[in-house]
């Protein structure tokens, strides 16, 4: 899931995570704000969380080399590493800058696509390791493709069937198997930040041979046939003749089959998503356009669901639960809704994979560096937000003032930013549609997230009970014979239920003091089960930690999670997850927390919908602040984040990676400049 709200520390304002102080200075990955994405995201540990200074420097150089090859400005990589690494060897920014600047690097051609300020979210060594041995060893590789041989062996293992290459790549029955994770070796795991490392994606790019290409794409208008010139002019009549094929008897083509009117859904769909009018009498077509039309026509005819409704621009139907990748939910008896959701995810995932096959590798790299996978893109934006707010936080700490008014003002200015689409040269149809789909998940998230934030706002009174909480901490300190404050880690998720059971009277008393709500003993068990799942999200967001035995949970964490659930039981906020084509879904958020399913199961399958997780986690964050009486900072921070997300999404409207890169970099520069001006004004006013 993707959680943007920081969980504020229940300490003084100068010690809050929002103010940029590290909980542990030796662990740079535990910095001022949280990663946005909590689903299978490991943060930036391998580069900036490495305790060995010489190895860390080596990783940074390798990261620079790889990013430079992909068109990323090295200065930005270097700036980010220096700014965030506080370990031995990088404590002196000037020294580190000189040392890294003097490192020799081979010359590479420049590229127009420019990476965002904080794109380097690399989490593994970025070294060229060469071709890796596939997991399955075959004596003979079909179509001279070792990856294909391993893929077919994988499909046979899953289905107990011998499957042809064409069926494995295109048939709907094998969609989920081709979108299962490819078994990358450890050195290649970083690649998943940029492209989903599924069997199909690895096959179409790393495992493609001339023989396999000829087998998969024999037709002139098959997207993937590189023997035909995609830039050559062509017309719909030629495409129709290829689709219909030659008559089995007699002479001429089978023109009685698919006609131009049958392509209407595809042509209208293309116009609706990327604003390209193909098939119009005044529009000149090229073979590449026809390849895209043919691909989309086959998908609309051969797969269930309404493809163009599924991938339509979010507008009023934005949903944080939109999916563009396969997730194994491990359901023994899936419901019709479960099946439909999976089919939709696989259809979008297939389309993205198929569209990538003819896009030049340099262009693909530019798209992947700028439009990181959904999880990593959100992480990059969080880091950018932190960089932007750094001047304001620094000044506020210096003069000991509340930064909330400055955050609020900055959010208002960003909302007024004139996001003008830059002039760019038209790109190919497959590239435009691929770029659009790479940004679609993020754009859905932005639209849906704003609605959830509004729905999650707490209207009921939550009383500050800091003194009562501190008395409870003192009692625990005496029992444990160690100092305990509101944020001292005292338990793990695994031990959390036992702690609540032992201290049930104390927790019930604190819940009532804060909310006025009484809690029965039998109800506390259910509340505790649900609260464990909120704490699981918190553990990942705050510490990138999935070990349920890790002692990271404080008194403030325990109480905030319990109150978040008890509050929902009382107010009964309704929220229906939005999945395309589904209407008969439950509106009670807590039903998705399912007491019968464990936290371990949640980590494996993510069975709680994203929107439900967001709603309850937002409440958890608010309650954390309300318990100590500091709501204004939360509200102003959220306004800033929402303003940034909205503008970021607007930068992606061109579906052209050059235009997107230009717009995002201008937005980041604008936000940084305004933040510096606001910080200077605060300092001047205080003098």
Image: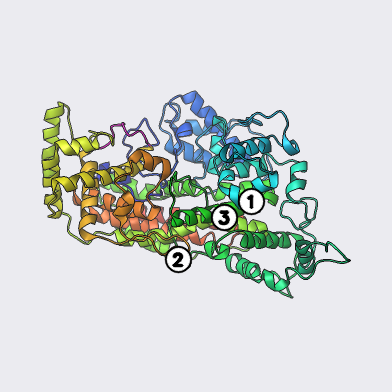
One can see residue 112 in this view:
no
Q: For residue 149: magenta?
A: no
Image depth: mark 2 or mark 3 in front: 3
Where is residue 543? Give x, y as percent. Answer: 35, 37
For the residue pair 54 and 318, the one nearer the viewer reads as 318
In three-dimensional space, the C-alpha distance between marks 2 and 3, rounded to whole angstroms, equals 19 Å
Residue contact at pointers 2 and 1, CB within 8 angstroms: no
User: Vertically, is 557 above or below 291?
Assistant: above
Q: Which residue is mark 2?
A: 317
Q: Residues within 10 Å of mark 2 (few under 14, many from 20)?
A: few
Where is residue 319? Give x, y as percent. Answer: 43, 60
Boundaries of the magenta span: 545-553
Total marks placed: 3
Identity of the residue drawn at 55% across and 51% down: 371
Where is residue 336? Give x, y as percent. Answer: 45, 57
Disc 1 element: loop
Q: For residue 552: magenta?
A: yes
Disc 2 element: helix
Residue found at the very far bottom of the displayed protein = 281
Question: Mark 2 vs mark 1: which is more N-terminal?
Answer: 1
For the residue pair 145 and 16, the one nearer the viewer reads as 145
One can see residue 501 in this view:
yes
Image depth: mark 1 or mark 3 in front: 1
For the residue pair 417 and 564, the one nearer the viewer reads as 564
Q: Which residue is mark 1?
A: 171
Q: Which residue is mark 3?
A: 347
Identity of the residue drawn at 38% across and 38% down: 544
């Amino acid at each position: 899931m993707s959680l943007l709200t920081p969980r504020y520390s229940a300490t003084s304002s100068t010690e809050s995570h929002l103010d940029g102080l590290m909980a542990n200075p030796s662990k740079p990955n535990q910095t001022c704000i949280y990663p946005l994405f909590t689903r299978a995201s490991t943060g930036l540990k391998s580069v900036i969380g490495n305790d060995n200074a010489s190895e860390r420097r080596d990783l940074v150089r390798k990261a620079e080399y790889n990013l430079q090859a992909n068109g990323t400005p090295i200065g930005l990589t270097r700036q980010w590493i220096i700014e965030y690494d506080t370990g031995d060897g990088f404590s002196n920014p000037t020294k580190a800058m000189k040392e890294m600047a003097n490192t020799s690097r081979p010359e590479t051609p420049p590229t127009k696509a420019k990476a965002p300020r904080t794109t380097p979210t690399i989490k593994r060594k970025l070294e060229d390791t060469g071709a890796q041995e596939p997991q399955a060893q075959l004596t003979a590789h079909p179509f001279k493709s070792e990856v294909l041989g391993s893929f077919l062996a994988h499909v046979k293992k899953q289905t107990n069937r011998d499957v042809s290459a064409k069926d494995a790549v295109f048939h709907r029955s094998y969609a989920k198997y081709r979108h299962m994770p490819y078994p990358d070796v450890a050195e290649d795991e970083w690649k998943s930040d940029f492209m989903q490392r599924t069997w199909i994606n690895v096959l179409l790019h790393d495992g493609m041979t001339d023989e396999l290409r000829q087998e998969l794409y024999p037709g002139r208008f098959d997207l993937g046939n590189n023997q035909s010139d995609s830039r050559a002019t062509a017309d719909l009549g030629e495409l129709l003749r290829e689709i219909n094929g030659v008559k089995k008897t007699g002479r001429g083509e089978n023109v009685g089959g698919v006609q131009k009117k049958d392509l209407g859904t595809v042509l209208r769909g293309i116009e609706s998503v990327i604003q390209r009018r193909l098939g119009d009498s005044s529009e000149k077509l090229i073979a590449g356009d026809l390849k895209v039309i043919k691909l989309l026509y086959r998908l609309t005819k051969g797969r269930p669901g309404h493809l163009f409704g599924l991938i339509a621009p979010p507008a009023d139907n934005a949903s944080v639960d939109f999916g563009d990748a396969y997730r194994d939910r491990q359901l023994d008896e899936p419901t019709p809704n479960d099946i439909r959701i999976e089919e939709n995810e696989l259809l979008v995932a297939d389309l993205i994979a198929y569209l990538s096959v003819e896009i030049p590798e340099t262009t693909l790299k530019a798209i992947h560096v700028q439009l990181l996978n959904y999880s990593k893109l959100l992480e990059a934006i969080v880091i950018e937000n932190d960089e932007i707010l750094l001047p304001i936080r620094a000044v506020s700490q210096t003069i000991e003032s509340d930064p909330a008014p400055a955050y609020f003002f900055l959010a208002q200015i960003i909302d007024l930013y004139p996001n003008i689409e830059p002039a760019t040269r038209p790109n190919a149809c497959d590239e435009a549609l691929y770029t659009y789909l790479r940004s679609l998940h993020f754009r859905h998230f932005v639209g849906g997230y704003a609605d959830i934030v509004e729905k999650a706002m707490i209207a009921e009174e939550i009383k500050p009970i800091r003194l009562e909480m501190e008395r409870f901490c003192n009692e625990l300190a005496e029992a444990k014979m160690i100092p305990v404050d509101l944020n001292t880690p005292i338990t793990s998720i695994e031990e959390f239920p036992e702690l609540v059971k032992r201290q049930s009277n104390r927790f019930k008393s604190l819940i009532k003091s804060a909310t006025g709500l009484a809690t029965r003993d039998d109800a506390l068990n259910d509340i505790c089960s649900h609260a464990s799942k909120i704490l699981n999200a918190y553990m990942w967001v705050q510490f990138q930690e999935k070990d349920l035995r890790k002692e990271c949970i404080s008194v403030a964490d325990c109480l905030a999670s319990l109150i978040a659930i008890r509050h929902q039981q009382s107010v009964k906020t309704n929220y229906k997850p939005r999945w395309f084509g589904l209407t008969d879904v439950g509106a009670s958020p807590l039903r998705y927390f399912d007491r019968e399913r464990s936290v371990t199961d949640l980590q494996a399958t993510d069975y709680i919908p994203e929107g439900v997780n967001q709603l309850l986690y937002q409440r958890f964050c608010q309650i954390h602040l309300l318990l100590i009486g500091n709501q204004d900072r939360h509200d102003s921070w959220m306004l800033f984040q929402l303003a940034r997300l909205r503008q970021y999404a607007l930068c992606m409207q061109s579906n052209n990676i050059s235009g997107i890169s230009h717009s995002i970099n201008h937005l980041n520069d604008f936000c940084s400049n305004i933040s510096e001006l606001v910080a200077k004004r605060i300092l001047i006013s205080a003098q």
